[in-house]
Image (spheres, coloured by chain):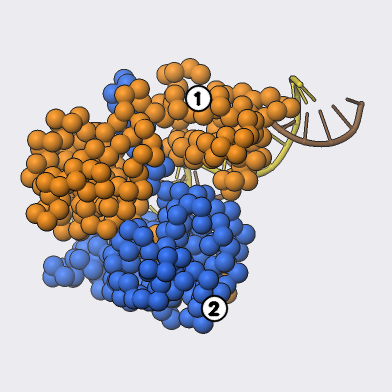
Chain colours: A blue, B orange, C yellow, D brown
Amino acid sequence: MDPKKTRDLPGKTIERLSQYRRILFNSTNEGKTNIYSHELAKVMNLTPVQVRRDLMLIGYSGSQSKGYVIKDLIALIGSIIDSKEPQNVAIVGMGNLGRAITSYFSGKRDRLSIVAAFDNDPQKTDRIIGGVPCHHINKISEVIPAMNIKMAILTVAPEGTFDVAKMLMNAGVKGLLNYTSVPLTVPDNIHLEEYDIITSLEKLAFFVKQDFDE
Amino acid sequence: MDPKKTRDLPGKTIERLSQYRRILFNSTNEGKTNIYSHELAKVMNLTPVQVRRDLMLIGYSGSQSKGYVIKDLIALIGSIIDSKEPQNVAIVGMGNLGRAITSYFSGKRDRLSIVAAFDNDPQKTDRIIGGVPCHHINKISEVIPAMNIKMAILTVAPEGTFDVAKMLMNAGVKGLLNYTSVPLTVPDNIHLEEYDIITSLEKLAFFVKQDFDE
DNA sequence: TAGATTGTTAATCGATTAACAATC
DNA sequence: TAGATTGTTAATCGATTAACAATC
């Protein structure tokens, strides 16, 4: 596909590409070599049209008789969403949530790896937790540039969120995944994703409640 | 506001109402009684117009000189997103992530409480974990209706996701918050929210990578 | 060919932002 | 009054869905 177009892909399409790939991996493991848009759509709870449109946007063509070649599609998605060099990730806050994400992640994606953890509890620092070396938070400015880390996952207690985010950005981090309940404000050149669990549950509760208010 | 309109509020507005309320609580704790749209917007990384539009949709009016009365606004948001009766929530899968969410939640919202946990590991069942009684998964069909639980948070291992979701729906659950990496398909009458951590991180990685590919 | 599928444009839907009148 | 703010409509932007031609 035209490489200068890749950066214009809609955010939602990027999310789905990541999920398509995961499903395609599973399909190859089951021995499938080809897949139709309606099959992919069914697994992901989408319409076949949406699948085809996403694939159109990345410039992939299937055949009307066989659908899409899974192996090729996995490779193409990888060429778009993976970077050539592996990307290093830090996680800040090694409570239950930090440990959950770390163990969840370990070995799952070879192009993305959590290579450093930080905490302010001396019980947790200068040890290896879940396979990742855990440093004290005051080492952020030193470790982040040394390991060329550009992304960080925030799983600290609410009170620490602002300060930690600031330290990370000062140390060169360009992308933050914020799992605390504190909304962050970041400069334009920093990428931020936030998914607050309480907000998610309150939203769900609202829609469930509606059904009973009728 | 016109009560029959409440159900037509956009999903994104509902999410923001939940977050406005959280910030407003903090502001009252700091002794503030009134707040302007631009103050609320700054904290949440939104535009003041967006804040005013959301408040317009819920029918709340401020004053041009004093902005919004925090206490009244908190009450109004509560009347919209909280249900009259407390809503009971179950969590399924008491690994790191399940425990993280449980402890994160305990005592935070009085209208939403996690009242039951489930796991398939006998080491974890028939005990109280993080203040919540943990049952074996084969008790789902019994405990869910008995406790009038309509929402569940899924934090099980990927292989168990489908079956657990089915059991929960059969037992009367109407809303699912899926934190596994397996996308779910649910009937129209079930509400589903999914936020997969790997997808979030891959999306972030894509945008961060773009900055360096320029 | 008939049926199933892909690829793509146009239309629609949903959410945000711009513009501006009204008010303190 | 001048300046700051709220409230609201219209315009824009982004994402999904409908419609349909092309192809195996």
Quadrant housing residue A56: bottom left
Question: What's the amino acid at mark 2?
Answer: Glu
Chain hosting mark 1: B
Would you place residue B13 above or below residue B58 in this image? Answer: below
- Image location of residue A27, percent across then percent down: 19, 66
Give how far across and how far down residue B25 sits, in percent: 52, 36
Q: Which mark is residue A159?
A: none
Label 1 sits on residue: B76
> Circle 1 — which element?
helix
Q: Nearer the viewer, residue A28 or A106?
A: A106
Q: Give the tally of numbered discs.
A: 2
The quadrant the N terminus of chain A occupies is: bottom left
* Residue D15 screen position, x and y as percent: 44, 49
Q: Residues within 10 Å of mark 1 (few under 14, many from 20)?
A: some
Residue A114, compared with residue B171, is above or below; it is below
Q: Rounded to the nearest whole Å, what is the CA distance between mark 1 and mark 2?
A: 47 Å
Residue B165's image quarter? top left
Classed neighbour count for the residue bearing mark 2: other residues with Cα under 10 Å, few (<14), some (14–19), many (≥20): few
Q: Nearer the viewer, residue A103 or A121?
A: A121
Helix, strand or loop under label 2? helix
The residue at the point 62 percent across, 35 percent down is B31
* Between marks 1 and 2 in the image, the one whose residue lies nearer the viewer: 2
Q: Are callouts 1 and 2 both on one chain?
A: no
Q: Position of residue A153 (x, y in %)?
A: 44, 63
Please report the residue visible at 24 percent of the width from the left and 62 percent of the height from the top: A23
Residue sitting at 58 percent across and 29 percent down? Answer: B70
Q: Which residue lies under the disc numbered 2?
A: A142
Dot 1 amino acid type: Leu
